[in-house]
C-alpha cells in the first residue's frame, strides 16, 4: 500500500541501509536512469510502502521471508509512463475504465483535464471525476478546468466555471493545477476573470496549462506567455514548438487517435539539437479503440523513437520531463529513492514491449493482462440524465434559408489528422427557400441539449465524403458538448437526434431511416461505465458504419466531435451560430444570394 513519503521515510531509510526487508525486490535488471540518460546493467530495486527505497547492484540483503521477488532477467527497468495532458472523457470511459485500459500499456500516471464534464455538470462534474481518479491503483491527478465556456460570448455551456470555483478547487486533494487556458484572446487582452484564475493557480503553487491555438507568435503570444501559461499542446509544427520552449514554456507533443503532431515537431530535438528537457509527450485525446488495439503512452514513445528520437530521450519526455514540469519530480518520473515505485519491465528499449507493470509497489499488469481492480464511484442521476432536447425535431429544422436561386455560403473544411479546420466558401443552389448542398458538402447542425431550448444552428461542412441519405449525431461536441449532427438528409438527422435522446447520450449513425450502429454514453452524454473492450467494439461498429456511408477519413468520429471547438481556427459551429475563430466573432452562414 502506498504511503506518503513522510509516513514511509523511516522505513525507507532502514531498507536502504540493509537493516530491514523490502516488500518487493526487482532483481537483475538494466536500470534506465532518466536523470543521467544512462542504462546501467546489473541492478536491483528495493521497494517498501509503495516507494523505491534503493537501487543497488545487489539488494539481496533486503529479501526477507515475505518479500516478493521479481526476476528482471536482464530486462530494462523503465519508469512508469506519464501522460502530460489528456481528457479522460475523450476515451468515452470513466476514470476507472480508462485506468483499466491503459495500465497494461505501462501508463502509471495521468494528468487529466476534465473540462468536458465541466461543461455539462460544472464543478460537481469535476469533483466526481476527481473522486473516481483518486480511487485508482495508478496516479491520476486532475487539472481544474479553466474555461467553461471556452469562449465566452461565442457559445453557451451547461454550467459555467467561475474564477471563485477555480480558487476553491486549488485546495482540493488531487488537483495538480489549472487545465488548459483555451481563452487565449482573453488572456492576451487582459481579461480580469481569466487572469484571476491563473493568479489563483499560481498562488497555490500549481501549474497553469496552456492552449495557444494561433499562428501569431508576436505580441499576442508574448502577452499570453506573460499571463502565466506554463505549457502548450496545440503546436503542430517545429517552429511553434521551438517558440514555446524559447519562452520558457513546456512543449507537449501529442499523438492521439486523430492528432499526429509528434513527427513534425520532434525534429527540433533530432535535427536542430535543442535541449529535450523542455519537451514532453502526451495523447490529448485517445478513443477507447486506440487504447485497446494500439496502446497509450507506450504507443507515443514508440512513435517518437520511430521518428528518429533516441529511445532514452523519448522515455525522458514521457517520464522525468513531465514530472519536473508539474513540480512532481520528488514523487514521480524516475526510478530513484523516495519516488513512487512505478516500474515497467521491457526486453527491448526500441520496440518497448510492456511485459510487466508495477504501480505504487504493486504488480498491476503482466503480458497485457490487468491484474488489479479499478474501482468506480456511484455516478448520480444528474450525471445519467443530461440530454434535454425540449422538443422533437423534424427535417425542416435542418434547413439553411436563403433568397433567390443561388447563394454563397461559408463552409467548415475538415483537415484530416489535425484539429484546425479551414474556412471555405461554396456557391450552391437555392430551392424552395433553402440552400442545397452538393458534391462533398454535407449539412451540419448544433442542437442545444443542456437546457431543452429546442435550438438548432445550421451550416455546411466539407471533407467527410458522405454519400446517400444518412446522418451522424453525437452528444460529444467539444467543448460545450451540445449535440453535433452531420448528414445529407434532414429526416435522418432528425431521427439521429431523437435516438440520442432515448440513449441518454452517445454517438449514432443512420442511413435511409435505419440506425446502423451506436455507442451509448449515458454518463454526462460523454462516457460509458462499461469496460473499454466493449466500448471499443461499439465505437468500431460506429466507425464501420461511417465508412459504409462513404467516409474514408482516419478517425472521422474525432474530427466530427471537434467541429464545435470554438477556440481552434478557422471556422466552427456553436449554439449561437457560426464562429470565425481567426477573429473570434459570429458570422453568417449565407454570405450573399442572388
Image (tube, helix red, strand yellow):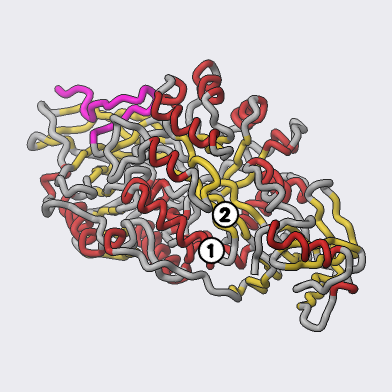
Find the residue positioned furthest to the left. 432
The numbered dot on residue 483 is: none
Q: Position of residue 443 (x, y in %)?
A: 25, 43
Q: Are marks 2 and 1 in contact (CB under 8 Å)?
A: yes
x 57%, y 44%: residue: 254
Q: In the shown orientation, is residue 4 left or right of residue 177? A: right
x 70%, y 57%: residue: 5
**Highlighted range, magenta:** 576-594
Which numbered disc flags the more N-terminal residue, 2 or 1?
1
The numbered dot on residue 110 is: 2
x 24%, y 39%: residue: 575
Residue 425: image quadrant is top left
Q: Which residue is mark 1?
A: 99
Residue 413 in view here? no
> Whole-Å distance between the Cαs marked 2 and 1?
9 Å
Find the residue positioned furthest to the bottom. 65
Is residue 278 located in the magenta-colored stretch of the structure? no
385 w.r.t. 28: above or below? above
Find the residue positioned furthest to the top. 219
Q: Position of residue 593 (x, y in %)?
A: 16, 24
Amino acid at each position: 500500500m502506498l504511503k506518503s513519503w513522510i509516513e514511509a521515510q523511516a522505513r525507507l531509510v532502514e531498507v536502504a541501509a540493509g537493516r530491514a526487508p523490502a516488500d518487493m525486490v526487482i532483481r537483475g535488471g538494466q536500470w534506465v536512469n532518466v536523470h543521467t540518460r544512462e542504462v546501467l546493467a546489473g541492478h536491483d530495486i528495493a521497494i517498501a510502502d509503495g516507494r523505491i527505497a534503493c537501487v543497488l547492484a545487489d539488494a539481496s540483503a533486503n529479501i526477507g521471508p515475505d518479500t516478493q521477488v521479481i526476476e528482471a532477467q536482464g530486462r530494462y527497468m523503465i519508469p512508469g509512463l506519464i501522460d502530460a495532458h489528456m481528457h479522460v472523457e475523450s476515451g468515452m470511459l470513466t476514470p476507472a475504465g480508462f485506468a483499466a485500459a491503459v495500465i497494461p500499456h505501462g501508463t502509471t500516471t495521468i494528468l487529466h483535464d476534465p473540462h468536458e464534464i465541466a461543461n455539462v455538470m460544472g464543478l460537481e462534474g469535476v469533483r466526481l471525476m476527481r473522486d473516481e481518479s483518486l480511487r485508482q491503483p495508478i496516479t491520476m491527478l486532475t487539472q481544474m478546468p479553466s474555461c467553461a465556456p471556452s469562449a465566452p460570448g461565442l457559445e453557451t455551456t451547461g454550467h459555467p466555471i467561475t474564477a471563485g470555483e477555480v480558487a476553491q478547487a486549488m485546495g482540493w486533494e488531487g488537483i495538480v493545477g489549472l487545465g488548459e487556458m483555451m481563452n487565449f484572446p482573453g488572456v492576451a487582452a487582459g481579461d480580469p476573470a481569466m487572469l484571476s484564475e491563473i493568479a489563483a493557480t499560481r498562488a497555490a503553487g500549481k501549474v497553469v496549462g496552456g492552449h495557444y491555438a494561433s499562428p501569431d507568435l508576436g505580441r499576442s503570444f508574448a502577452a499570453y506567455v506573460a499571463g502565466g501559461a506554463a505549457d502548450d499542446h496545440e503546436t503542430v509544427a517545429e517552429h511553434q514548438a521551438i517558440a514555446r520552449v524559447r519562452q520558457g514554456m513546456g512543449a507537449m507533443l501529442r499523438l492521439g487517435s486523430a492528432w499526429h503532431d509528434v513527427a513534425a515537431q520532434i525534429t527540433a530535438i533530432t535535427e536542430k539539437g535543442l535541449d529535450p528537457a523542455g519537451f514532453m509527450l502526451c495523447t490529448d485525446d485517445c478513443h477507447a479503440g486506440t487504447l485497446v488495439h494500439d496502446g497509450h503512452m507506450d504507443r507515443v514513445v514508440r512513435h517518437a523513437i520511430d521518428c528518429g528520437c533516441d529511445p532514452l530521450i523519448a522515455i525522458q519526455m514521457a517520464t522525468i520531463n513531465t514530472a519536473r514540469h508539474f513540480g512532481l519530480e520528488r514523487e514521480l518520473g524516475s526510478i530513484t529513492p523516495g519516488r513512487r515505485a512505478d516500474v515497467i519491465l521491457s526486453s527491448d528499449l526500441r520496440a518497448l514491449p510492456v511485459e510487466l507493470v508495477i504501480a505504487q509497489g504493486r504488480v498491476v499488469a503482466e503480458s497485457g493482462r490487468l491484474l488489479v481492480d479499478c474501482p468506480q464511484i456511484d455516478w448520480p442521476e444528474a450525471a445519467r440524465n443530461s440530454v434535454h432536447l425540449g422538443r422533437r425535431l423534424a427535417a425542416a429544422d435542418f434547413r439553411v434559408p436563403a433568397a433567390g436561386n443561388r447563394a454563397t455560403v461559408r463552409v467548415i473544411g475538415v483537415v484530416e489528422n489535425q484539429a484546425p479546420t479551414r474556412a471555405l466558401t461554396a456557391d450552391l443552389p437555392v430551392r424552395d427557400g433553402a440552400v442545397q448542398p452538393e458534391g462533398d458538402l454535407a449539412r451540419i447542425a448544433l442542437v442545444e441539449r443542456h437546457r431543452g431550448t429546442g435550438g438548432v444552428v445550421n451550416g455546411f461542412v466539407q471533407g467527410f465524403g458522405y454519400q446517400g441519405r444518412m446522418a451522424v449525431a453525437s452528444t460529444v461536441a467539444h467543448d460545450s458538448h451540445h449535440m453535433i449532427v452531420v448528414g445529407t438528409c434532414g429526416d435522418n438527422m432528425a431521427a439521429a437526434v431523437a435516438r440520442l435522446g432515448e440513449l441518454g447520450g452517445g454517438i449514432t449513425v443512420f442511413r435511409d431511416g435505419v440506425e446502423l450502429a451506436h455507442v451509448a454514453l449515458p454518463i454526462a452524454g460523454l462516457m460509458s461505465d462499461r469496460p473499454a473492450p466493449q466500448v471499443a467494439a461499439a465505437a468500431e461498429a460506429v466507425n464501420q458504419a461511417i465508412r459504409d456511408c462513404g467516409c474514408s477519413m482516419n478517425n472521422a468520429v474525432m474530427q466530427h466531435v471537434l467541429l464545435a471547438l470554438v477556440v481552434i481556427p478557422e471556422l466552427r459551429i456553436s449554439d449561437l451560430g457560426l464562429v470565425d475563430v481567426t477573429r473570434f466573432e459570429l458570422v453568417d452562414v449565407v454570405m450573399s444570394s442572388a
